[in-house]
Image: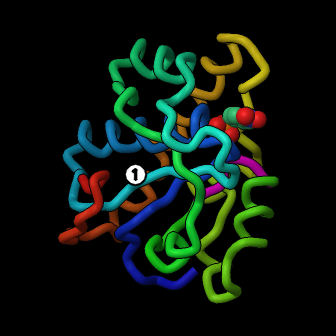
Amino acid sequence: MSAKPIKSILFVCLGNICRSPLAEGVFRAVLTEQGKDQGLVIDSAGTGGWHAGQEPDRRSIAVAARHGVDISGQRARKVLQEDFSRFDLMLGMDNANVRDLKALAPQAAHDRIHLYLDFATGKTVDVPDPYYDGAEAFASVYRMIREASDALAKRLGASASPTSGHASSTM
Ligand code: 4NP
């Protein structure tokens, strides 16, 4: 990766209703808690578009709400080609997401695509898809994302800088 400051991050999963909306909402909350909401543009998207326009899965909304984070206003969307020029960093929740992102991305964007937990914490581990599982899977995903969000804020703390971002998800 280049040493350029990171000013925009896209969190990516398959459907953009379970994991990446949590990653977006929790990271935004962590930045606010830490007073680091310095104009990073953050957003989330799915490599698949089946749920485009929908609010997050009610189980993700519920687990976030239990921890004081409201993600109910977010809406799912599919990854767009323009995302590969717009975002400094694209973090896939699992290795299939990373593979699919790289298949869609121009070669020049490949070094901005990483496995989320690897980039944030150095652990080469997936955030597993909880869609077909129960509430405990969503609780486990939340814990992974909370830990990764703290680590990501720490990692970016030194390099993030103010920006006049204009997306709806601008901090
Ligand atoms: P996500 O979970 O990728 O974390 O949003 C999924 C949501 C929907 C589906 C798969 C995974 N689906 O097959 O519809």
Mark yes or no: residue 128 visible: no
- Examine the structure image and report whether residue 93 is included in the region drawn in magenta: yes
Quadrant of ligand 1: it is top right
Q: Is residue 107 magenta?
A: no
In what element is the residue under mark 1?
Answer: helix
> Is 29 positioned to the left or the right of 155 in the image?
left
Q: Is residue 112 above or below residue 96?
A: below
Write down the residue under mark 1: 153
Q: Nearer the viewer, residue 12 or 146?
A: 12
Quadrant in the picture for residue 15: top right
Residue at the image position 72 percent from the left and 26 percent from the top: 130
Q: As rendered, which of 111 and 76 lies closer to the eye? A: 76
Quadrant position of the N terminus in the picture: bottom right
Residue 40 drawn at (x, y percent)? 30, 61
The residue positioned 47% from the left and 73% from the top of the image is 88
At x 51%, y 30%, the residue is 56
Query: Magenta residues?
Result: 91-95
Instruction: State the image quarter where residue 138 is shown.
Output: top right
Q: Residue 33 location in percent, x, y?
A: 25, 36
| Callout 1 amino acid | Ala
Is residue 93 visible in the rendered image? The answer is yes
